Amino acid sequence: MPSLHEIKEGLFSYQESEKGWVATVRTPADLLAAAKKVREAGIQNWDCYSPCPIHGMDEAMGLHRSWIPFITLVFALLGATLGISYISYIDLIDWSIVYAGKPYFSWPAYIPILFELSVFFGGTATVAAVLILGKLGKISRKPINNRITSDGFAVWIGDSVSREKVQEILGNLAEEVSAVE
Amino acid sequence: MSLESVKNPFHIGKTFKQIDDDIMRPMETFPSKTWWIAFLIAASLLAMFAGILIYSFVKGLGIFGLNNPVGWGLYIVNFVFWVGIGHAGTLISAILFLFRQRWRTSINRAAEAMTIFAVMVAAIFPLIHVGRPWFVFWVFPYPNERGPLWVNWRSPLLWDVFAISTYFIISLQFWYMGLVPDFANMRDRQERFKARSKIGELLLTVKKITLRVISLGWVGSAKTWHHYEKMVLILSALATPLVLSVHTIVSFDFATSIIPGWHATIFPPYFVAGAIYSGFAMVLTLMIIMRRTFKLEDYITMKHLENIGLVILVTGMMVSYAYTVEFVIAAYSANKVEQYVFMNRLAGPYAWAFWTMFACNVVSPHFMWFKKLRNNLTVLFIISIVVNIGMWFERFVIVVTSLHRDYLPSSWDMYVPTIYDWGMMLGSFGVFFTFFLLFVRTLPVIAIAEVKADEANDSLHAAH
């Protein structure tokens, strides 16, 4: 059973990369290899940066499954529940009226609306979850270097590890290791 | 960074820097004369659209050709037409994503933009058609002082409100979230630009601040990508049934009524196939122009266009099948009224519309059987236009021919669209193209990060 702290850390996986070392690598394959090495070295405070998602990065970095699908499911069900409650209140209590000889509670006719509501709630919650879990929205944040969003690949390691150790872990995978203040 | 070439027909084989430069070029150069001419035409049509709209508010719906029995005219035709166009974008970004179709990557951004603008245009029509558009918010079931007077939950028109608004919001979120990494890319590129005047400097500052805000502080962290990729998958899984539901519900507007010609169980799949058919035709039209003017031939290749042609062939045949089934069911039904409606389509006063539709939708896609024709830009372009003319007429045939002959011959009437009806139709293209032309100059028309992800994946496989 994970502790509350671990759950919280797991939720907000993104970490600010303030002080530490940044090692640039050349290719996506190098970044994957570097991630594997850093993980095997048992380092906790680190992250990888790339201009695009890289297949296999989750396993290489040892990231656990994203919570996103769970959040989607909960909110989709919430949308449908709120919808059916609201419609039932209106059709059964507030304004019971016979339409076209159909029962007061004509559930088959509600299905399209309930479906749309669950998609709307589920989809919007999914986007909101990425913003929160990925800690997006802090617009003052700058990338670790300007090439990252274009064609740069880099590993960042927190300053609890010495520069020599970083170099030792990454070996010749690293193109350049520089300090982040 | 260089990538080794791999044997994937959609592999681009350029460096990431080249990809950035190629795709961002239209945004970083002054628009060409062609763009300005196209934009001026589109904007004038938009102005005409707005003018007719205001005139209709002043004079009322009487300026349009609507009558009794034809209470739904070109407005609903245009509504269904534009919603149909709006189907290809989400289909490309969601369904082709789930099916792991690599060719979606180069076209999904522009197709999604097309979807959003088409749905915006579509939504205008029913809003005006209600007659008192200033009360249009009454379609939303909020507690009110009118009784409270609630909406009818059993009405497909209300389902439509929910379907179209959900579709629009989800598509918009999907599109925006896809743009965020590209916005960050643009943000980090701005350093290279130097303003030459005071005004230029001000504009550049505004641009930098805007990009900073809309890129949401994206830094390309693998831990953010991890959630982000899951989101793309989940949104695709949600958008797939959503896109099918939208035109299904639009078809319910017709099919749940008891008007002969509308009351058919085949309507939902028939409408969905038609929507994909016309949507892909519109994508084809736009892509052929876009790749040429922006020199994106390396990204949107002939193979992409050929695939779109194949989708048009398949959905065109589905639509043809639906037409046939409608006639067979009418013949088989032993229902005189039903049979009359369909004979009237074939040989009645609107037979010209039916046969235009038939020639455009049933005959023209079969050219796509031939590889030579699928690889001929002129043929593809003509087919894409012809299909959309046909699909517009399909909606005209469905709406008008079913209504204009009521049960009693004394209630028969012809529907003749007025100059304002046609003006609204032409104007709706102006609205759409104004938005689209602005889009191609201000946002990356190809999803850069996704193209890079595919290229990176190729290089990983090549390394193995």
Image (cartoon, coloured by chain):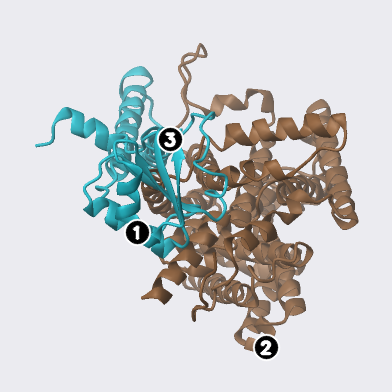
Cα distance between the residues tagged 3 and 1: 35 Å
Q: Quadrant of residue B341?
A: bottom right
Mark 3 and mark 1 lie on one chain; the one further toward the N terminus is: 3
Please state which of the two labelled residues, at mark 2 or mark 1, is closer to the viewer. Answer: 1
Quarter of the image with the C terminus of chain B is bottom left
Chain painted cyan: A
In the displayed structure, would residue B136 be above or below residue B123? above
Tag 3 residue:
A131
Q: Amino acid at mark 3?
A: Leu
Q: CA distance from mark 2 to mark 1?
A: 53 Å
Could you tell me which residue is drawn at 50 percent across and 78 percent down?
B8
Left or right, B298 with respect to A174, comes to: right
Output the chain of dot 2.
B
Alpha carbon distance from label 2 to label 3: 47 Å
Q: Give the image location of residue B284, x and y in percent.
A: 67, 67
- Tag 2 residue: B372
Is circle 3 on the same chain as circle 1?
yes
* Residue that extends furthest to the left in the rendered view of this protein: A1
Image location of residue A54, percent across then percent down: 41, 58
Q: Residues within 10 Å of mark 3 (few under 14, many from 20)?
A: some
Q: Colour of chain B?
A: brown
Residue shown at 67%/88% (left/top)? B372
Specify whether B415 is left or right of B394.
Answer: right
Q: Name the residue beneath numbered marker 1.
A: A171
